Amino acid sequence: MNWRKITLHSFRRYVKTTISDLGYSDYSEWFIGHSGSTYWRKKDNEKAEIFQKIEPYLTVGVCKLLII
């Protein structure tokens, strides 16, 4: 197997690319901490709505709990 090294940078790149590919490139910039744009302004509830749309694409390693 060819395993890739996971770093903070590779994780940020994955998140940025995934959100941008879903059509939210401005949100992706804000999400990874590039909040300096004077043109992109959204209320907190609007940001939360976008996050609810993209969260399933960012979730990694979800497993069901085993109830005994």
Image (cartoon, rainbow, N blue to C red):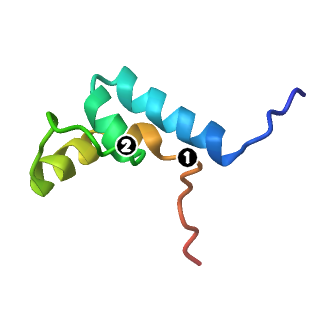
Which residue is identified by label 2? Answer: 34
Residue at position x 36%, y 45% in the image = 31
Residue at position x 27%, y 31% in the image = 26
Q: Position of residue 17 (x, y in %)?
A: 47, 27
Q: Residues within 10 Å of mark 2 (few under 14, many from 20)?
A: few
Q: Earlier in the sequence, mark 1 or mark 2?
A: 2
Which is more toward the observer, 68 or 51? 51
Find numbered disc 2 in the image and state the secondary structure of the residue it sits on: loop
Q: Amino acid at mark 2?
A: His
Residue at position x 64%, y 37% in the image = 10
From the viewer's perspective, is residue 58 above or below residue 16? below
| Quarter the C terminus occupies | bottom right
Residue at position x 87%, y 27% in the image = 2
Which residue is identified by label 1? Answer: 60
63 on left or right of 4: left
Q: Position of residue 27 (x, y in %)?
A: 28, 37
Q: Position of residue 4 (x, y in %)?
A: 80, 33
20 on left or right of 40: right
Q: Amino acid at mark 1?
A: Val
| Quarter the N terminus occupies | top right
